[in-house]
Image (spheres, rainbow, N blue to C red):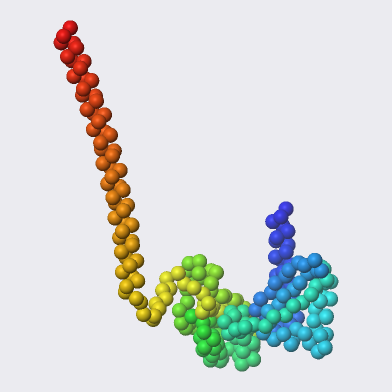
C-alpha cells in the first residue's frame, strides 16, 4: 500500500528529528528536510549554530552521518547545513531560546524571559506574536501565562498556514513546563489588506476611461433594444396571418 509507505517515511523523519535534537541540544534547529537523490539520501538542516553540528575538524558531522546510516537505514547520507536568515521570526528557535533561558535562570524569572523574547520578535519585523507558558510557575498549582504583542490571526486558513507555531517542553525542578510560540511574519499577505499609493492621479486619464466604459454600455443597450423590436415584429406578423385565415374560412362557409 502507498499509504503505509508514506506513514513509514514520516515516522522515520520524526525519529531522525528527535535523535538530532537529543544528541545535539542547543543547535537551534528551525527546519529539517530529507530528500532522495541519485547519489543517496540528503539531510538538509537549517540551524542557528552550524558550528556545533560540524564540530572540531568535522568530527561530529562525520559521526552523525555514520549513525544515521546505521540506525535509520539511510543510503549514503549527506548532511547539508543552512543558516537562518531571521532567527527571531522562527517560532522553533524562539521556543528553544525560552527553554534554555528557563533551565538556566529558573522558573522565577519567566515573566522577564517572555517579555524579552516578545520585544526581540517585534523588533525583527513581525506583525504579531504570542508566547504561552503552562505549568507550575511560580506556585505549586499549574497556571497558564499568556503574553501577546501586535496583531495575530487565530481563525481561518491563514492561522493554519501562515502563522508559525512551535511547542516545546522544558523539564525543571518544579516539573515540566509547556512553551508555545506563535509568530505572524511580515511576509504574510492578509486578504483584507489594502495598499494605498501616494502617487498623484491624472484626472484626464480617469475621464477617458469612464467615457469609454459608458460608450460600451450604450452600445450594449442599443443592441438589446434592436433585438427586442425584431422579436416583437415577428410575433405581430404571425398573429395577423392567423386572423386572415380565420376570416377567409368564415366567408367561405357563408357562401355555401
Q: State the image quarter where residue 25 is shown.
A: bottom right
Q: Which residue is pictured at 80% across the width and 78% down the height?
A: 64
Q: Is residue 35 left or right of residue 147?
A: right
Q: Is residue 242 left or right of residue 206?
A: left
The quarter of the rendered structure image containing the C terminus is top left
Point out residue 68 in the picture as x, y percentages from the top left corner: 80, 73
In the orientation shown, which residue stands out farthest toward the left?
254
Callout count: 0
Q: State the image quarter where residue 50 is shown.
A: bottom right
Point out residue 125 in the picture as x, y percentages from the top left corner: 52, 84
Q: Is residue 28 visible?
A: no
Q: Nearer the viewer, residue 107 or 7?
A: 7
In the orientation shown, which residue stands out farthest toward the top?
256
Point out residue 31 in the picture as x, y percentages from the top left corner: 66, 76
Q: Is residue 243 above or below residue 183?
A: above
Point out residue 32 in the picture as x, y percentages from the top left corner: 69, 74
Q: Which residue is pictured at 58% across the width and 85% down the height?
A: 88
Q: Which residue is pictured at 70% across the width and 72% down the height?
A: 33
Q: Nearer the viewer, residue 120 or 186?
A: 186
Q: Which residue is pictured at 67% across the width and 83% down the height?
A: 83
Q: Is residue 77 left or right of residue 226?
A: right
Q: Is residue 87 visible?
A: yes
Q: Is residue 206 above or below residue 28?
A: above
Amino acid at each position: 500500500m502507498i499509504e503505509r509507505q508514506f506513514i513509514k517515511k514520516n515516522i522515520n523523519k520524526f525519529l531522525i528529528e528527535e535523535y538530532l535534537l537529543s544528541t545535539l541540544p542547543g543547535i537551534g534547529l528551525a527546519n529539517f528536510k530529507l530528500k532522495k537523490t541519485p547519489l543517496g539520501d540528503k539531510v538538509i538542516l537549517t540551524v542557528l549554530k552550524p558550528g556545533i553540528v560540524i564540530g572540531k575538524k568535522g568530527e561530529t558531522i562525520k559521526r552523525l552521518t555514520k549513525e544515521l546510516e546505521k540506525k535509520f537505514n539511510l543510503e549514503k547520507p549527506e548532511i547539508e547545513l543552512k543558516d537562518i536568515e531571521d532567527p527571531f521570526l522562527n517560532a522553533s528557535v524562539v521556543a528553544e531560546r525560552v527553554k534554555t533561558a528557563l533551565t538556566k535562570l529558573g522558573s522565577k524569572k519567566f515573566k522577564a524571559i517572555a517579555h524579552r523574547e516578545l520585544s526581540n520578535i517585534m523588533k525583527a519585523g513581525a506583525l504579531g506574536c504570542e508566547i504561552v507558558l503552562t505549568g507550575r510557575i511560580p506556585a505549586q498549582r499549574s497556571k497558564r501565562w499568556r503574553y501577546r504583542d501586535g496583531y495575530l490571526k487565530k481563525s481561518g486558513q491563514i492561522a493554519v498556514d501562515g502563522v508559525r507555531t512551535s511547542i516545546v517542553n522544558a523539564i525543571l525542578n518544579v516539573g515540566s513546563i509547556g512553551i508555545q510560540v506563535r509568530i505572524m511574519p511580515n511576509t504574510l499577505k492578509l486578504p483584507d489588506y489594502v495598499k494605498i499609493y501616494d502617487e498623484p492621479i491624472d484626472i484626464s486619464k480617469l475621464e477617458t476611461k469612464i467615457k469609454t466604459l459608458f460608450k460600451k454600455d450604450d452600445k450594449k443597450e442599443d443592441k438589446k433594444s434592436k433585438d427586442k423590436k425584431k422579436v416583437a415584429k415577428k410575433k405581430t406578423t404571425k398573429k395577423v396571418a392567423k386572423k386572415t385565415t380565420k376570416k377567409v374560412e368564415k366567408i367561405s362557409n357563408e357562401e355555401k
